[in-house]
Amino acid sequence: MKKKWLTGIFASVLVLGACGSNETSEESGSESGDKVEWRFGHLADENHIWHKTALKFEELVEEKSDGQMEITIYPNNSLGGETDTINSIQAGTADMVISGETLQNWAPNAALMAVPYAFRDLEHVKSVIEGEIGEQIKQEIGEEAGLKALYYHTRAPRNLTSNKAITSPDDLKGFSMRVPNVPLFLDVWQAAGASPQVMDFNEVFTGLQQGVIDGQENPVDLIKSGGLAEVQDFVNRTEHVYSWIYILVGNEQYDALSDDLKQVVQDAAAEAQIFGEDLYETEIAAVEQDLMDAGMEFVDVDQDAFREVMTPAVEASLSSEQLELYKQILAVE
């Protein structure tokens, strides 16, 4: 850094009177003229779609910026859990994160990103993300959480894992389970008869191993990524949530970029979006097979029964504004 600083002074002496500091900043591609370094933390492991896509995004940004930007990726919650990383971004000690419905703790309408039995399938999810409702949620995240969404991943449906087969809500009596820090998830699983508790994902494996919880719910890719086949026997196909998740950067970090580097980030994000979608198509079926090969049994459940007990809890948990958005989501073709 000292060598770079001295070089900058020498260059400015040579061109004294010919150009100002603003021009130097613009030519360098960043507002300060220094190399931009971002720290990107997420919860998935190195083999997960999110991480592989993040690596592609990193590669594209560094290539398109001619090395003016550098992104270091920290998988496996190595910068802390999802909420911790968001707090770190807001404090300026991290820059990027992958997050979804947890954002409702800052931006209430982010709860609509993962409402049980609100979405019919992934095509329904994509129609919402790329329409007016998705734009409204993204804008609120920017204003209330201070985070800018760059690209997104659709997610495999969330399923309940356990060490006994669960086919209906009747099987949930006395069943202790982990949910993420999403109040709505607490409400709907309590309504279904379980005993849910909030826990960061990085604590789930140990919680299951030690019997602190009996089960948890997540898409199959995170079930595999978290190594849960070692401590759970069944994947119960509740498919209670179809959803999406954003790759986000702090507003302040993004706004500090020059216009040229903002364009670099946007272009890289658009390419990463396509890369991630292609990965999803090829990998989710393989993930299910891997879980079966690891000894997990997939169980068909009475989804209508789960929908019936959860829907009143959903409607009771939503604010009037959220409830209106929920109804709009149900109506999207």
Image (cartoon, rainbow, N blue to C red):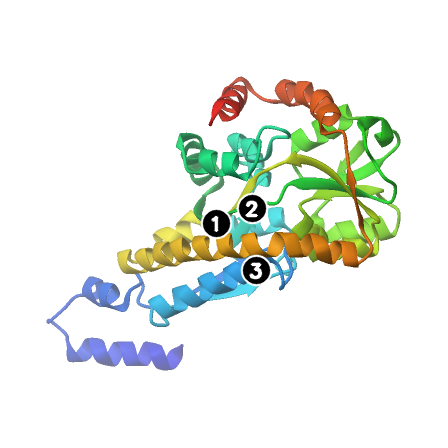
Task: Between residue 106 and residue 237, name the one nearer to us.
Answer: 237
The residue that disc 2 covers is 99
Is residue 257 visible to us here?
A: no
The amino acid type of the residue labelled 3 equals: His
The residue that disc 1 covers is 248
Q: Where is residue 216 in the image (x, y as percent from the top left)?
A: 76, 42
N-terminal of the pair, mark 3 or mark 2, is 3
Residue 33: quarter of image: bottom left
In the image, residue 126 sits, relative to residue 52, either above or below, namely: above
Marks 3 and 2: which is nearer the front? 3
Do residues under tags 3 and 2 come within 8 Å of each other at their CB atoms?
Answer: no
The amino acid type of the residue labelled 2 equals: Ser
Secondary structure type for disc 1: strand
Q: Where is residue 267 in the image (x, y as percent from the top left)?
A: 35, 57
Residue 51's label in the rendered image is 3
Give the alpha-carbon distance from disc 2 to disc 1, as whole Å.
7 Å
N-terminal of the pair, mark 1 or mark 3, is 3
In the image, residue 171 sits, relative to residue 26, either above or below, namely: above
Task: Between residue 322 and residue 2, name the one nearer to us.
Answer: 322
